[in-house]
Structure formats: C-alpha cells, structure tokens
Amino acid sequence: MATKERLIIESMFNIADKSGRDVPFMLNDSQRRLDDELSGRDIIPKARQEGISSYYLARWTALCLSQRNVRAVVISHDALSTQRMLKKVHYFLENLRGPKAVIKNASANEIVFGKTNSMFYIGTAGTKKFGRGDTITHLHCSEVAFWEQPLTLLTGLFQAVPKDGEIALESTGNGVGNYYHRTCMRAAIGQSRYRMHFFNWIEFSEYTLDLDQDQSDAIMSNLIEEFEEPELVEKYNLTAGQLAWRRDKLDELDYDLTQFKQEYPITLDECFQSGGRSLFTRVNYYETAEWKRQDFNYHYLEGHPNSNYTYCIGADVAGGIGGKSVEKNEKSDSDGDRSVAQIICIELMEQVGEWVSNKIEPDAFGRKLAAFGRLFHNAYIVVEANNHGILTINELLTSYDQSLVHRRSGGRKSEIVDRLATYGVRTTSKSKPYIIGELRRMLTYDLQVHSPVLKSELDTFIEKESGALGAVNGCFDDRVIALAMCNAGLEKAAMYVQSNRQEVAKLNQDPFSMEGIISELTDNRGGFPIASQTRH
C-alpha cells in the first residue's frame, strides 16, 4: 500500500526527465518497491542511479510540507553530492503543482518551513556534529560505504534519532570488511535492526535499450562468453536489450567486469567486491526464497530435515567470548570469532542448514551439535579439533553416538586427551591448503550452497602475502571453515550411510529367500566365507 508521502509526491511534485523537461514525479520500479516495504530502519545496497536518494529527498520534503515539527536530515559522502541534493529539494519546492510552500528560512544547508515548523538539513559527512541536544525525526545517510570513519559519524547521528524516528542507510558497494558491508551482511541474515532492500540492475526496467528484431537476433546469436553473457541468459533470462545496455556500460568501464558488478550488481555478493582475489572463483551458489530464517542464529532450507535423507554437519569452534564490531581495517580480538555449524544433505549434495553464534561456550556448542545431529536424523558430525574444538568434541562424545563423530585413524588411546585428539579434523599450515583445495573442487562441481553470507565469506577468502589462507582483513571465514570440515568428512559420512542402509535392508529381508540366505553368508567385506567345494 502506498504511503501518504508517495501520494503527495506523485500528485504535487515535478522532476526533470533525461531531456530536461518538467514532468510529474512518478515513482519508478525501485522507488515504489521501497515505498511499499519501508520499516523505519532500512538499509539499501543497490545498483547505481536507481533513484533511491531522490526518493528520500522527495519523501522528507513531503513530510516537512505536511507534518509539524519534522526534523529531516540527509547526509551525503561529499560536498558536490550535497550541493546536487540541495538543488533538487529547491527544485521540488519551486515547481510544486499546488499551493506555494511557505519557507521561513533557506540557508546553504538548511530549509525551515514556516507553516509546519519543520526543518530539512542536507550536509556532508563529518561537517556537522550531531549530539545529545539535537533531535532528528527522519535520517537518510547516502553512499555510506564511501564515508570516512562512518561508525564515528553515525554514532552521533543515531543518538539524535528517537525510537519512533526513521533511519535509512543507502549505498552502492565499496569493497568488503567495512562498516557498510558488515551491516548489510548482518541484515541479510536477520541479525540486525535493519530491514534490507537490495535493488539489482536486471529488475530495473530503465536499464535496457530499445532494439529492433534484427538487432536483437544479432545479439542473441552472438553471445560473448568473455562477458559471461551465455551464463546470464541461461540463469536470469536476460533480454537482448538488457545485454546491449550492459555492453554499453562495460565499454564505459573499460570492460572491467569486477567494477561493473560492483556498480551494477545482480546479487548481493556482487555488490561487495574483494580487494584481493578470492580462492573460490567459481561457487555453485543458488539464491532461493526457500532459505529460511528460524531465529537469530539458525537458517535452514525449507523441506529439511527429512527422514528420507541423511546429513553431515561440519563445525568450526570459537571461544564464545562475544564482542562487538569496531571500525578498523582489521578484525580485532574484541570482534570474537563465531562457532558455526554447516549442514549438508549427502544425497542431494546441498547446503540445508547454517547455525552461527559468537556467544556460545565450546562445551555448550558440543551439546548444540548433538541436538542438531538428532534433529537431522542421526547426522554424521565433523568438528575442527584445533584449540577450543577439543572441548566441544569431549562434550559431543558424552551426549551423542560416538560412531557418528568423525574420527581419524590412529587406534585407541588410553589417556583422555590423546583419545580426544583422534576425533575431528586438525587444520595446520600443511593440511589447510589441501582441505581448502578439496572444498574449492567440491563447490565448483558438486556442492550447492544457499547462504548469502557464506557466499560473501567465500568471496573474501584469499591467500595472503604471507602465504596464509583466510579472510580479507575485517572479514570472517568461520562459515567457510565449518563447510570445509563438513566436506572433509563427507566420504566417511557417505560410507556410514551406505553401511547403515545395508543393515536396514538386511533387517527387512526375508531370511528364507535366496537373497536372504546369500546375504546371511556374506562377510563384512562382501566376500563369501564358505570354502570352494571344487576339487583341483
């Protein structure tokens, strides 16, 4: 349902079209969708030039005209953008299709509306300090990803907005590990006060060119593989007009695909491009509405767990110290790594669950894994055994079937620490490249994943200058390591599943049938124990 501000905008406001003509301001596709879905705490990663800033400028102006005591603020990332925004607001007011606005005062950055006692301030990030004495009823922060020290600046702004005020953060992407990237990733999985609205370019109707039939046929019959066009047509059903528009933009960007994807993303992970080259260059990732959030920590694929399938759980263990994000180029100790469980359906080779927490103690995580193992019909569990992992394994062995906990070869040990050391998977500087390499291969050809945040972590997993493998500074890799653990145990998990099914089949078999008699006489290795009766 349209907001009352949209009704004011479309009935009273004009805007200049691409030819410079005054035309009624009718919301475009992205603006209408945002207007329909506003929550009051909104974050908007987007493709370029979809009109999101224009929407908020018009919305705040409509509020100042129609409501008393509005204190609306728009903060941009640079002075030039601030000037353009202020000019646009003056344009709205000077070209109203209705009674002329009563303006009490109009300074370089501030417009005061005399009739409603409302105020609209437009400024540049860092040029004005907002503190405890200020009140902001409506705040829009534009191109936040390009602000210097955004957390420092936003802290003061946020404190000035009451609980019933509105806050909107909007930007195109600008790399990973920064405040905007982290905030978007939290919102993407529902671990944030913000509702995320992602606007890609292929759903924006203006991003296409009008072509005749011959031009369309020429493009569709000559798709350029270097530009990933065959894949885009197959996956997203792009039209010839959209491909022609995309080729024009690529030409403007000197055919830099990475830059194009950041400026005009199709998926959320394209919006945030890593400065380093990810080790996971091709990932079988499929974004689906069936990937559901159950609670703050847990996401699952609709339809699972299912008793007809078998599952493997991989776990990366943290200390459970909690912590909060800080604004630095590198992740600090106070961020706290997360304990993560990744759940894979063995038959479908598909991610069906993801559980994440930075506050659970290692032993409690062992009990949580046991609970997930039972929920997923006696799943096979693989734990990274490094550091805190041994505490998780110890708890897991006391609360779950030990035969379903991944164990390395090495025989039985008498001492408890030595015995625990045989369980799980240890990652070292020597073993990690192999474990990650196997995960790369599996994600390219076999294993499908659905978590957008896992995809983001895969995109920021690199080989550093030191040769170490891990996340880009400021990012996490816990989801990646948990998935690698799961992958490391898949072969044994599959063997267990096959053996278990054979046992079930034997139980269900008629013992007096020929198949039953042969099965009864067959040893565990598939051999036939009765000696040959043929004379030699």
Image (cartoon, rainbow, N blue to C red):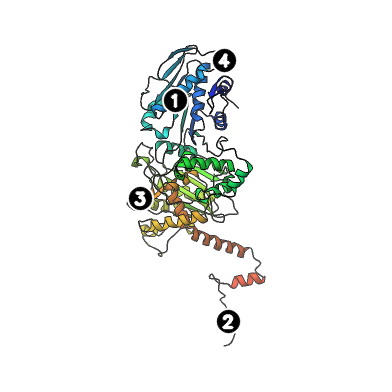
Q: Residue 182 falls in which quadrant of the image?
A: top left
Say the numbered circle drawn on residue 98.
Answer: 4
How many numbered marks does the figure carry? 4
Q: Which mark is residue 532?
A: 2
Tag 3: residue type?
Lys
Mark 2: give few (<14), some (14-19) or many (20+) Cα within 10 Å. few
When the figure is inspected, residue 92 is found, relative to residue 307, above or below; the finding is above
The mark that comes first in sequence, 2 or 1, is: 1
Residue that mark 3 sits on: 464
Closest to the camera, between mark 1 and mark 3, is 1
Quadrant where the N terminus sits is: top right
Q: Could you tell me which secondary element the residue under label 1 belongs to?
A: helix
Circle 3/circle 4 CB separation < 8 Å: no
Are circles 1 and 4 on residues that touch, CB within 8 Å?
no
Chain-order first, disc 1 or disc 3: 1
Mark before the other along the chain sequence, 4 or 2: 4
Read off the residue under disc 1.
84
Where residue 518 sits in the image (x, y, percent)?
A: 62, 72
Q: Mark 4 or mark 2, which is nearer to you?
A: 4
Q: CA distance from mark 4 to mark 2?
A: 103 Å
247 and 172: which is toward the camera: 247
**Viewer-side label of 2, 1:** 1
> What is the CA distance from the residue labelled 3 to the residue labelled 4?
61 Å
In this view, 437 is above or below 73: below
Task: Identify the amino acid type marked 2.
Answer: Ser
Mark 2 vs mark 3, foreground winner is 3
Callout 4 secondary element: loop
Vertical placement of 4 versus 365: above or below? above
Callout 1: few (<14), some (14-19), or many (20+) C-alpha neighbours within 10 Å? few
